[in-house]
Amino acid sequence: MRGVLSGQAFLGIEWSWWKLIGWFGNVAFFSRFIIQWYASERRGRVVVPISFWWLSLVGSLLLTLYAVYRQDSVFIFAYGFTWFPYVRNLVLERRQRVGSVQCEQCQKAIDGPVNYCPECGEPLNELEGDVARGNLALNCAREATAWEESGPAKLQPARVQPASSLTESASRSWQNISGKSH
């Protein structure tokens, strides 16, 4: 491989370590489109997977390094600042992933600070819900605001469950907390 990288031509290209960095940047940047296209075709709708943003970030950073080496101001400007939205989208995705909870009954992923599953009405485990995410104060403030706006007569749960279902849920919660079964 030393002969290939010492300036000899291979496939009509003079190869060096910097040339490899530039080519890897191009491959990473181009492959993000293939990944996005494949993910969208699989789901039947437009999807931008997390790997798209990682490939965008890696590709733009490698191409920026190559452009700085070449001292090419056009390419430095073209790739030097594109990493801002890529990093921002990765941060947003991480926040969303960390903030989601999965309902034990219907297995639906739920985003946001909620205490009940909007799909089946199952109470979410307190340790996975608002308390674990530090949103207890936010949830209490939201409930207090709803109380002030609508009054106690208008506050009702989104979905009413039969008493037997509530008893089973309370029993499961007690088992989770105490580790005991009845």
Image (tube, rainbow, N blue to C red):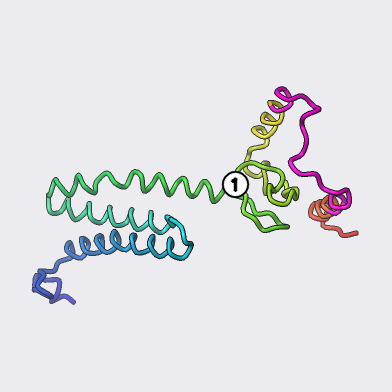
130 horizontally vs 171: left or right: left
Residue identified by numbered label 1 = 111
Q: Is residue 177 above or below residue 138?
A: below
Labels in figure, total: 1
Q: In which quadrant will I find the N terminus?
A: bottom left
Position in image of residue 146 (x %, y %): 70, 28
Relative placement, left or right, of 109 versus 49 is: right
**Residue 103 quadrant:** bottom right
Q: Is residue 23 left or right of residue 129?
A: left
Q: Is residue 134 above or below residue 165?
A: above
Q: Secondary structure at mark 1?
A: loop
When asked about the image quadrant of residue 54, the answer is bottom left
Q: Does residue 78 belong to the magenta stretch?
A: no
Q: Residue at x 20, y 65 (%)?
A: 20
Q: Is residue 156 magenta?
A: yes
Q: Amino acid at mark 1?
A: Asp
Q: Residue furthest front?
A: 44
Looking at the picture, tell me which residue is in the foreground, 116 or 16: 116
Seen at 38% across and 57% down, the residue is: 52
| Magenta region, residue range | 146-168
22 relative to 98 in the view: left or right: left
Q: Quadrant of the C terminus?
A: bottom right
Give residue 134's position: percent from left, percent from top: 63, 39
Is 149 rendered above or below residue 31? above
Q: Residue at x 64, y 33 (%)?
A: 138
| Residue 100 x %, y % | 59, 49
Q: Nearer the viewer, residue 30 or 90?
A: 30
Q: Residue furthest right?
A: 182
Residue 137 is situated, as x and y percent measured from the top left of the image, at 67, 32
